[in-house]
Image (tube, rainbow, N blue to C red):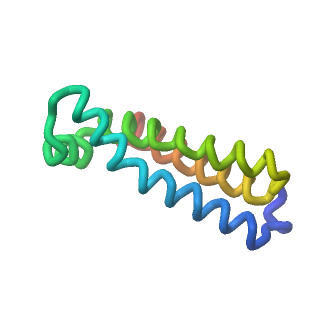
Amino acid sequence: MNFRNWTKQHTLGLLLGIATTIVFIPIIMFVLGSIDNISFSRMWFKFSLIHAEKTRIVSLASIANLIWFHSFLKKENFSYGQGVIFATILNLLFILYYKFIA
């Protein structure tokens, strides 16, 4: 991807991908807490302190970006799709940082 050709559609796709991950983090925490019989506040505590839990939840929340990516490809809005992929790459960098560095 050439950053000199970055458009408004790329930025909107990027923001949509980041917002989707942020919205799905509490949903994933609620579902995992329900499966493990843990309260949401306890899941939030684990998410904020334990790096392995943080990477697990963010990686699961990033899967929701596939919905946007697939719909943008189907409508041939490739710029939006590239923005969503870039947001997913940013999530990957976040996950790798917390998994191996922090």
Residue drawn at x 81%, y 52% as measured from the top left: 75
Residue drawn at x 52%, y 47% as measured from the top left: 91
Q: Position of residue 101 (x, y in %)?
A: 40, 40
- Total residue callouts: 0
In the image, is 30 to the left or to the right of 59?
left
In the image, is 94 to the left or to the right of 5?
left
Outermost residue to the top: 36
In the image, is 99 to the left or to the right of 46?
right
Q: Position of residue 13 (x, y in %)?
A: 67, 61
Look at the picture and state if 54 lies above or below 19: above
The image quadrant where one finds the C terminus is top left
> Which of the 4 quarters of the picture holds residue 80?
bottom right
Residue drawn at x 63%, y 60% as measured from the top left: 14
Q: Position of residue 21 (x, y in %)?
A: 48, 51
Q: Position of residue 11 (x, y in %)?
A: 68, 67
- Which residue is at the front of the view, 12 or 98? 12
